[in-house]
Image (cartoon, rainbow, N blue to C red):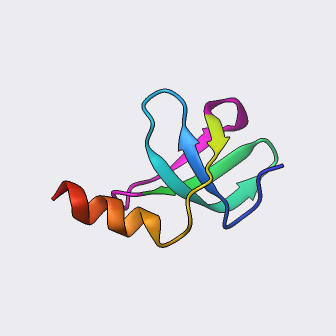
Amino acid sequence: MIQVGDLVVYVKDGAKGVVIHIEEDRFQIKWEDDFVSWEKREWLLTSQLEHGDLPKQKEQRE
């Protein structure tokens, strides 16, 4: 079960983000590039990364 605050991965492209809101079967995600979108459960996988890993990965790519 995905909850607010969980780290997730978008299965279509591997993008990582954090769940910030849930409404019925839709999850609002703040992605690592600060973009926010609503996604269906079937497109999300929970991530094993720690919260601090998202900014670190972003810095490593820049």
Residue 1 as seen in the image, left or right of residue 56:
right
Q: Is residue 34 left or right of residue 62?
A: right
Residue 11 location, quadrant:
top right
**Residue nearest the observer in this picture, 23 or 2:** 2
User: Which image quarter: residue 53?
Assistant: bottom left
- Identity of the residue drawn at 62% across and 31% down: 43
Q: Residue 15 at what x, y percent from top left? A: 43, 43
> Which of the pair 55/35 is nearer the observer?
55
Q: Does 25 appear in magenta?
A: no
Residue 60 spot, x, y in % from top left: 23, 60
Residue that protrudes farthest toward the left in the picture: 62
**4 relative to 48 in the view: left or right:** right
Q: Residue at x 84, y 49 (%)?
A: 1
Task: Residue 35: say if magenta.
Answer: yes
Image coordinates for residue 26, horizontal then vertical, percent: 71, 44
Above or below residue 6? Residue 27 is above
Which segment is the magenta one?
32-43
